[in-house]
Amino acid sequence: MSTPDHPTGGIDTVRERLNVVTQETRFSLIQDILGHPAQLPTLKELDYVNPDKSQTTIRQHLQKLVTEGIVEEVALPKDQRQNDLPYKFYGLSEEGREFLDEHGLLRAEETLGEIYNTIEKTETIQRYETAPRPDR
């Protein structure tokens, strides 16, 4: 039976969403997004910091996070794109940030940034990391 504070499916929806974001690979991707200097990494950057996962696996998990409204895909406007640099990025949506914060999943945000900065990066990843990002 539903109550005004908990409509039918409300608690189940929260539980399902928590299951989505706390699944190991997806939680790792969220942490990688939070740790990235711009909090807008590319697929290639996420692939680099997750060497034990295929790019296809990463893409599938990102898509699930996008579908759930936790992550959003953000593109650089066409007039700002450069041939040798990425133009598609992944970041937490406003709704996703609120959900994660509400459930205490953003507490390590500063530490994640510090950890990300210690990762040794290839020249390509360094270029990608400093590529222009869209305004959000």
Image: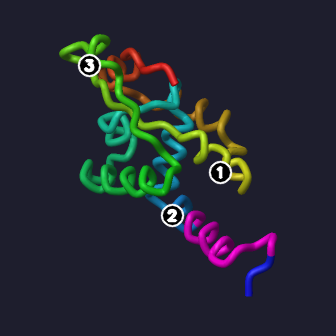
Describe the element under mark 3 as helix, strand or loop: loop
Looking at the rendered structure, the kind of residue marked 1 is: Leu
- Mark 1 is surrounded, within 10 Å at the Cα level, by few (under 14), some (14 to 19) or many (20 or more) other residues, namely some
Total residue callouts? 3
Describe the element under mark 1 as helix, strand or loop: helix
In the image, 126: left or right of 21?
A: left
Residue at image coords 46%, 30%: 40
Q: CA distance from mark 2 to mark 1?
A: 11 Å
Looking at the rendered structure, the kind of residue marked 3 is: Leu
User: Is 92 within the magenta?
Assistant: no
Q: What label does residue 20 carry, if any?
A: 2
Please name whichever residue, 132 or 27, is drawn nearer the observer in this view of the structure.
132
* Mark found first going from the N terminus, 3 or 1: 3
User: Which quadrant of the figure has residue 57?
Assistant: bottom left
User: Is 6 within the magenta?
Assistant: yes
Q: CA distance from mark 3 to mark 2?
A: 31 Å
Looking at the rendered structure, the kind of residue marked 2 is: Val
Where is mark 3, residue-wise? 85
Q: Residues in magenta? A: 4-18
In the image, 123: left or right of 91?
A: left
Where is mark 1, residue-wise? 100
In the rendered image, which quarter contains the N terminus?
bottom right
Q: Furthest residue to the front?
A: 4
In the image, 84: left or right of 128?
A: left
